Amino acid sequence: MSAYLEKLRDPRWQKKRLEVLTRDDWCCQMCFDSKSTLHVHHMYYEAGHEPWDYPLTTFRTLCETCHTEEGESKRETEAILIKSLRRSGALNAELYELQNVFEPFYLDDRDWSVLSCFLKYLLFDRDAGGSEWNRVHDLARAQWKMFAVEMDKK
């Protein structure tokens, strides 16, 4: 048996696993299946951490099928996202600001749904010459200027 599989038998992991399954109502958080075998998915790993050493917010209950698909396709999707970011024309400061948006926040599946829907809405509005994009753009630009002024004071 591998060392990792042995760690999954540890009572500390079993306790964490039960907390996650209970929190997620014993249901896959991707397809909402509650009849199949359920797995507790780590959203990321960090060197030197034991499987149970992560906050509850970093786990999601997935059925066996969704867990397999997540593992097989995530690296490919991450590579596509990086390629898209490179093609977007974003400057380093803009990418840094985007990273700063995500770093302090845990986003659950509902947050990601809202965020992606809102971004699509705004970009469609922009392409259609709508006023919502301009309003959000002006607000963001004003906030960025205030941030730049604060940074200059330091």
Image (cartoon, helix red, strand yellow):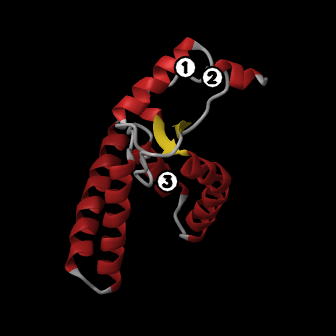
Of the two numbered discs 1 and 3 on the same chain, state the one appearing first in sequence. Answer: 1
On screen, residue 64 versus residue 100, left or right, reads right
Of the two numbered discs 3 and 2 on the same chain, state the one appearing first in sequence. Answer: 2
Pick whichever, 43 or 66, lies toward us: 66
Task: Report, in whole angstroms, how far the alpha carbon at label 1 lies from the one at label 3.
Answer: 40 Å
Helix, strand or loop at disc 3? Answer: helix
Depicted 129 relative to depicted 16: above or below: below
On screen, residue 108 versus residue 36, left or right, reads left
Q: Residue furthest bottom?
A: 128
What amino acid is labelled 1 in the image?
A: Trp
Residue, disc 3: 93
Q: Position of residue 138 (x, y in %)?
A: 24, 67
Q: Specify few, some or many for label 3: CA neighbours under 10 Å numbering under 14, 14-19, or 20 or more.
A: few
Q: Specify few, some or many for label 2: CA neighbours under 10 Å numbering under 14, 14-19, or 20 or more.
A: some
Residue, disc 2: 8
Q: Specify few, some or many for label 1: CA neighbours under 10 Å numbering under 14, 14-19, or 20 or more.
A: some
Pick whichever, 11 or 73, lies toward us: 11
Pick whichever, 57 or 115, lies toward us: 57
Q: Residue furthest top?
A: 11
What amino acid is labelled 2 in the image?
A: Leu
Q: Position of residue 153 (x, y in %)?
A: 32, 38
Q: Residue at x 25, y 66 (%)?
A: 136
Residue, disc 1: 13
